[in-house]
Image (cartoon, rainbow, N blue to C red):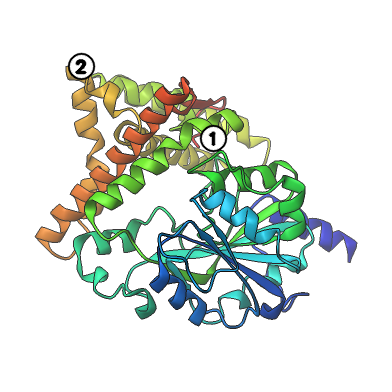
Amino acid sequence: DPRDGRLARRLVDAGLAHPLFDSGPYRAADVTLVVPVKDNAAGLAALLANTAEMADRIVVDDGSATPLPQATLRNPAPRGPAAARNSGWRLAAGELVAFLDSDTVPEPGWLDTVLPLFADPQVAAVAPRVRTGPGSTALGSTALGSTALGRYETDRSSLDMGAEPAAVRPLSRVSYVPTAALVVRRSALAAAGGFDERLRFGEDVDLVWRLVARGQTVRYQPAAVVWHAARPGLRAWLRQRYDYGTSAAPLSARHPDKLCPVRMSRWSAAAWALAAAGHPLAGLAVAAVTAGLLPRKLRGRGLPSAASLGLAARGHLGAGRLLADAVRRTWWPIALLSPFGRRVLLASLLPCLIAAAGRPHDLDRLRWAALRIADDLAYGAGVWAGCLRHRTLRPLRPRFAEWPGRSG
């Protein structure tokens, strides 16, 4: 029925429903595998051994010190992952291209829940869930899972977008997906011009946002799992988090208003600012008054007052968590400059301590909390370094919604 189709499209486009298809026009044999690799012969061998279902496989050796015999083509000097992926997908003959990094191994049958989503012609790309931890012996990650860093990465890897499916959109719950594992239509890549080779980090975020800006759909499908090897030590891991942070400035220049440290209502911000300044009763009064305004806005849409008040309360509470994350993750260099800022920074550590309290052992709780704090601080240092390098403050600016009680 055309009306059913229109309703389904509205629900899917709004992110209220996730499409399921019994089958689609593609099979694993129709997919071209593209692997960018540099100095990781063991990882490449493990990946190729676990992706035999894709007959067409293109390996791009991006300037390895020892040339890789499996390589389809080789760059004499490293050009970066964006250039390597571009060289690979442009050689693909089929319509679908699966990008997998050499330090990943997909679970058997991972494409079974990814490929049916391409039955929707608006879908340009589908990302599986990328998990870090002892899920694949081919990655040698069982030993990693016994370390504090390995357990933390299993819980909070920056590549893992969670267990719930979603449409990928800027400023949403799943605002980006990594190209460590991503299946994309070749025609969509060609129309978008491929990856931006000027970006050393964040090139995957940039591609996804450009596809979405073109009116195409990018979906996240956590039913498909690809395992990713974590960095071998704390120093390499912190460097990775710092490098990721440096991408914020160039991304904000290419995609204005699509990247910010926090998004919430002005009233939520005012309530928490008063509480942080030592006036908790005034902050509570602002929150209560603005929560009382929301039922009038939503009554005309048929939402009961009790439900509206509940939404407003959850919005204010959620805004507090978002502010704590922003202080700890992005604004901490400013917070260190004053006694008040340092008190706010200390208060922002509370969510980390609460999350760590769920760990089974005291020592593990302490290590987990320390890694969570170090994760945020390293990323924030990268954000500031990128801002200084590109002479912009865009990634540091909050965004405010107009409706009372509404928070991002």
Classed neighbour count for the residue bearing mark 2: other residues with Cα under 10 Å, few (<14), some (14–19), many (≥20): few
Q: Is residue 207 visible?
A: yes
The location of residue 187, given as percent across then percent down, is 77, 57
Name the side, left or right, on which 7 lies relative to 390.
right
The location of residue 394, given as percent across then percent down, is 49, 24
| Amino acid type, callout 2 | Ser
Which circle marks residue 251 in the picture? 1
The location of residue 392, given as percent across then percent down, is 48, 21
| Amino acid type, callout 1 | Leu
Task: Identify the image quadrant of residue 203.
Answer: top right
Q: Out of 105 and 111, give the one closest to the viewer.
A: 105
Which residue is at 60% across, 51% downward? 168
> Against 159, is 381 above or below?
above
Q: Secondary structure at mark 1?
A: helix
Which residue is at 62% across, 47% downward? 195
Q: Earlier in the sequence, mark 1 or mark 2?
A: 1
Name the side, left or right, on which 353 lies relative to 61.
left
Which circle marks residue 217 in the picture? none
Residue that numbered label 2 is attached to: 338
